[in-house]
Image (tube, rainbow, N blue to C red):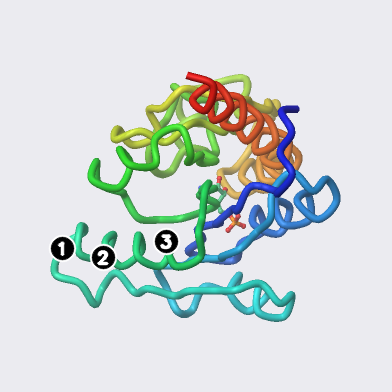
Amino acid sequence: MAEREEPVRLAIFISGRGSNMKTLVQACLDEGFAKPVLILSNSYSAAGLEWATENDLPIAAIDHRAYDDRESFEKDVQDTLELHNVEFIALAGFMRVLTPWFTDQWEGRMINIHPSLLPKYPGLHTHKRAIEAGDKEAGCSVHWVTAGVDEGAVIDQERVEIMPNDTPDALAERVLEREHFLYPRALQKAISDFLVRELQNEAD
Ligand code: GRF
């Protein structure tokens, strides 16, 4: 892994319970490759915010419903990121589509976890769609975020078998277990790539 004296300043975006966020925070504490400096949510009621507060992590809740359009919401998000000197973003169950205005400026510095084997099933209801299609396996992917929803290059994946008579909920639970295994590993890899690029840019 590319080294730097200071750990990369990481923001994690959530909208709900934040189980993936917890695994990322733990990995950062264990491995030291990044420092979670901000947990940001688009909903005040995201359960993960409570956990973050209990664990002394800085939080920001910016309710998208208070804005007339996506970009004004994103401008406040961007200001908040700058205030915390954020260098890298991990989306972890963040349920807002981001505009190119935001994704372009974070390209190469923002990743997402998606509960399907991308490029299969971008968007919602991935488990139901995989079962209905008669797929034999499902899984999860961590990918770079670009303007197209769930379209950026895949960094890493984990696979699970789809059982006969599987339900979307049962499958989601098994996939989530793999997500918790996958995301810390993929974050570490993505940050390493980011640091290599940063060093190259400095050398140019
Ligand atoms: C995960 O399944 C993730 O892949 C999807 O939303 C869910 C978030 O779960 N994007 P959690 O908030 O991390 O527990």
Residue 73 coordinates in the image, percent (x, y): 26, 65
Q: Amino acid at mark 2?
A: Phe
Side of 30 relative to 77 (left or right): right
Q: Describe the element under mark 1 as helix, strand or loop.
A: loop
In the rendered image, which residue does mark 1 sit on?
A: 69
Q: Residues within 10 Å of mark 3 (few under 14, many from 20)?
A: few
Residue at the spot x=73%, y=53% of the render? 23
Measure how far apart labels 3 and 2 are at the Cα level: 15 Å
- Tell whether circle 3 marks a residue whose Cβ is less than 8 angstroms from ligand 1: no
What is the spatial separation of the Cα atoms under label 2 and label 1, in whole angstroms?
7 Å
Q: Is residue 161 left or right of residue 32?
A: left
Q: Cα distance, mark 3 to mark 1? A: 21 Å
Q: Residues within 10 Å of mark 2 (few under 14, many from 20)?
A: some
**Residue type (three-letter) at the residue carrying disc 1:** Asp
Question: What residue is shown with label 3?
Answer: 82
Q: Nearer the viewer, mark 3 or mark 2?
A: 3
Mark 2 lies on a secondary structure that is helix
N-terminal-most mark, 3 or 1:
1
Query: Which numbered marker is on residue 41?
Result: none
Residue at left offset 63%, top offset 25%: 156
Q: Secondary structure at mark 3?
A: helix
Could you say where residue 124 lies in the image, as x and y percent from the top left?
40, 44
The residue wearing badge 2 is: 73
Quadrant location of the N terminus in the rendered image: top right
